[in-house]
Image (tube, rainbow, N blue to C red):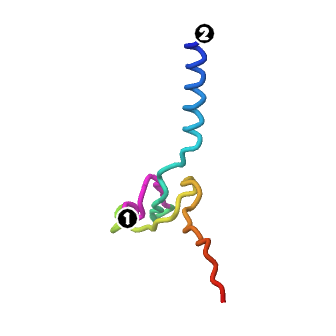
Amino acid sequence: MRIVIAGLVGLIVGLAAEAAHADQYKWCAEYSGRGGGSSNCYFVTLAQCQAAVSGVGGYCRRSNFGGPEERPRRSKRRAYD
């Protein structure tokens, strides 16, 4: 019985950790071409994406699946006059 409970707890923890993990691929390459183009959203950094479109035409954009956008934190200090 202990093994079954331990297995269920392990399964629940594993599923919760997987659900909280954001997609690491934050950049997409949009390639231009005749009659349409294609896209590739498997770039971790902007530099990787720019290297992929260099010389073949296209541009890089943020992926829609990269999770929340990283924003700089605001300082809690307040300026007093």
Task: Tell me the SS state at disc 1.
Answer: helix
Determine the residue positioned at 48% across, 62% down: 30
Q: Residue furthest front?
A: 80
| Number of callouts | 2
Quadrant holding the N terminus: top right
User: x and y percent of residue 12 in the render?
Assistant: 60, 29
Q: Which residue is mark 2?
A: 1
Q: Residue furthest right?
A: 81
Marks 2/1 in contact by CB < 8 Å: the verdict is no
Residue 45 among magenta residues: yes
Q: Which mark is residue 47?
A: 1
User: x and y percent of residue 63 in the render?
Assistant: 53, 58
Please determine whether, in this image, residue 33 is positioned above or below residue 75.
above
* Occupied quadrant, residue 43: bottom left
* Occupied quadrant, residue 17: top right
User: x and y percent of residue 8 in the render?
Assistant: 60, 21
In front of the other: 10 or 77: 77
* Occupied quadrant, residue 79: bottom right
54 relative to 12 in the view: left or right? left
Q: Which residues are magenta?
A: 37-50
Looking at the rendered structure, the kind of residue marked 1 is Ala
